[in-house]
Image (spheres, rainbow, N blue to C red):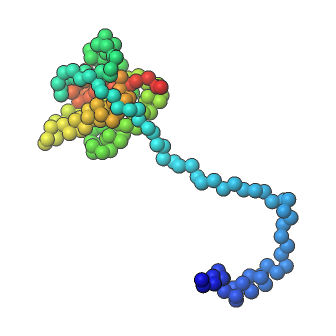
Amino acid sequence: MRPKRPLVSPEDQALFLEAVGGATPLPGRDRDRVNVRPPKSVIKVVELPPEVKLAVEGDARHYLVRAPGVSLQQVAQLRAGKVRAEQTLDLHGETIDKALGHLRTFLVEQQRLGRRTVLVVHGKGTHSEVGAPLREAVLAALLGELSGLVHAMATAAPSDGGEGATYVMLRGRT
């Protein structure tokens, strides 16, 4: 086994000792102990509730979606467009990846704040050459990974965007 090399050269060590030769250490009792902790992460990791199998009625243009145990009476006002959305998320002009990230953050935050009904504006896809990719991605996310947040959802009333928007009734906080 080779001997370890000193961290500083003998010349540098002699210069250092000469420079601090007249210094005296502070007494031990006057020193404060400092606990160095790693900084807290600024990234919030939010776990979504488990996915839920939602019941879907209607077609791709006009739909009503309910979580298990939710009766049609409970969502009749939602289906009729008589529910006022407490908050709106407009995803127009966003890429699918960005839009889905914003959707997830938005729904988690709205649920945390105790909001019950929100409006998600995704557009009808009239400016797309291949249908409505953003609308389809939003609906797929709401029916898939975000389904644990959904109590019910329906196509918005024409005054709120019609086929280009979706009312989402959020589950209560658990």
Tell me what residue is drawn at x 84 percent, y 66 percent: 26
Estimate the x, y position of residue 155 in percent, counting from the top left. 25, 24
Tell me what residue is drawn at x 19 percent, y 21 percent: 58
- Relative vertical location of residue 25 with respect to residue 170 in this rendering, above or below: below
Estimate the x, y position of residue 128 in percent, counting from the top left. 16, 41
- Residue 171 seen in this snapshot: yes
- Relative vertical location of residue 91 with respect to residue 111 in this rendering, above or below: below
Q: Quadrant of residue 151?
A: top left
Q: Is residue 110 left or right of residue 22?
A: left
Estimate the x, y position of residue 23 in percent, counting from the top left. 83, 75
Tell me what residue is drawn at x 46 percent, y 43 percent: 45
- Relative vertical location of residue 41 with respect to residue 52 in this rendering, above or below: below
Q: Quadrant of residue 27?
A: bottom right
- Relative vertical location of residue 168 with respect to residue 70 in this rendering, above or below: below
Q: Residue furthest front?
A: 1
Tell which of 126 and 23 is nearer to you. 23
Q: Quadrant of residue 153?
A: top left
- Residue 119 seen in this snapshot: no
Q: Residue furthest top?
A: 73
Tell which of 158 and 141 is nearer to you. 141
Q: Quadrant of the N terminus?
A: bottom right
